[in-house]
Image (spheres, rainbow, N blue to C red):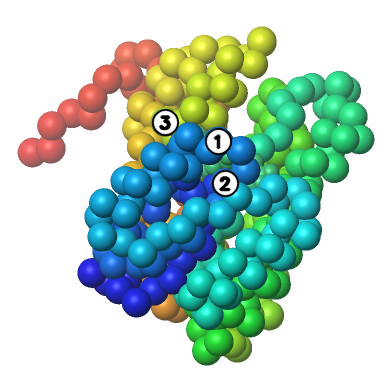
Amino acid sequence: MRFSDRIALITGGTRGIGKALALLLARQGAALVLNYKRNEQAARATLAEIEALGCQVSVCRADLEEPAQIDALFEHVGKRHGRLDFFISNAAASAFKRIADLNARNLDRTFALNVRAFVLGAVRAVPLMGAGGRIVALSSYGSQRAYPTYANLGAAKAAIEAWVRYMALEFGPQGISVNAVSGGLIDTDSLEFFYNVPGIPPMESVLSKLPRARRGKVEEMAAAVAFLLSPEAEYITGQTLAVDGGLSVIAPPFQADATAPLAGAPPPRR
Ligand SMILES: NC(=O)c1ccc[n+]([C@@H]2O[C@H](COP(=O)([O-])OP(=O)(O)OC[C@H]3O[C@@H](n4cnc5c(N)ncnc54)[C@H](OP(=O)(O)O)[C@@H]3O)[C@@H](O)[C@H]2O)c1
């Protein structure tokens, strides 16, 4: 129960990675506020699942593209708990298009949800954290690498990682650590959605290139976030931790495409 008496706010916390994190924190004693935008059914199901664990949990609908709704979300946290220990900025969405096809609305909405909501949320979270707390943002390898249709969200994720470093600097003296967890291909609805964008090559062609040639699990992302929230991570701040099966370290020519004598399992050690 390493998170007992801790209060955590997870944006987009009722589905996917956010939900896996909510379950992990709930099992370890945390009290939770889970935000969502419109999927009422998922919110109700997650609420019931977490309540059944005996955890103190509430869900709060707020469209984080709207600053007034971010304020309302933090007012909910303040009224219900009076303080906050962990702010996890997890909600994300974007328009996956060629750069030439992106319009001003696509750019504004992606920035508003992914970057502005993280910053405004952190600004609201800090006073609720008092003498210390943790902020973790979810990022992806699109912040550093380029691949088709991801420019809009990739640039937002790069901004998030930069904000993480600046927040670590400014909030550190208040005992607040700020980090990011950057995911690879993690098994969620949004991964399925991305690989169904017309023109994107089959997911298998990417997975087969990875040092760990499979999708990541939501529980593996949640475990990395939980580590950054744990007492063991007290001295880690301003960092981005990759959970991607090695995706971000490989380059062409790919090991997976190598032929003899380089292909295959390494020889047994004597
Ligand atoms: N899945 C991956 O492969 C992968 C890889 C790397 C990084 N990540 C990152 O990990 C995080 C979680 O990803 P995921 O795949 O688990 O997400 P997901 O399954 O698509 O869930 C997204 C969550 O964000 C919420 N949301 C969307 N727009 C919102 C808005 N305007 N205001 C408030 N909430 C909003 C959704 O609410 P509703 O339920 O109401 O729709 C949902 O709870 C994201 O930051 C993502 O970029 C994911």
Mark drawn on residue 187:
3
Q: Is residue 134 visible?
A: no
Earlier in the chain: of badge 3 and badge 2, it is 2
Mark 3 residue CB less than 8 A from any atom of ligand 1: yes
* Callout 1 touching callout 2 (CB < 8 Å): yes
Residue indicated by mark 1: 39
Quadrant housing the C terminus? top left
Query: Furthest residue to the right?
Result: 104
Where 171 sits versus 226, above or below? below
- Pointer 3: residues within 10 angstroms few (<14), some, or many (20+)? some
Q: Disc 3 to disc 2, how far (Cα)? A: 19 Å
On the image, the x and y values in percent for residue 220 come to: 35, 45
Earlier in the chain: of badge 1 and badge 3, it is 1
Q: Disc 1 to disc 3, how far (Cα)? A: 19 Å
Question: Residue at left 36%, top 27%?
Answer: 214
Q: Disc 1 to disc 2, how far (Cα)? A: 7 Å
- Pointer 1: residues within 10 angstroms few (<14), some, or many (20+)? few
On the image, the x and y values in percent for residue 109 come to: 80, 41
* Callout 3 touching callout 2 (CB < 8 Å): no
Q: Nearer the viewer, residue 130 or 245?
A: 130
Mark 2 residue CB less than 8 A from any atom of ligand 1: yes
Q: Is residue 241 left or right of residue 267?
A: right
- Pointer 2: residues within 10 angstroms few (<14), some, or many (20+)? many
Question: Splitting the image into 4 quarters, where does residue 218 fall?
Answer: top left
Mark 1 residue CB less than 8 A from any atom of ligand 1: yes
Q: Is residue 130 left or right of residue 211?
A: right
Q: Amino acid at mark 1?
A: Asn
Q: Amino acid at mark 3?
A: Asp
Specify the quarter for ligand 1: top right
Q: Secondary structure at mark 3?
A: loop
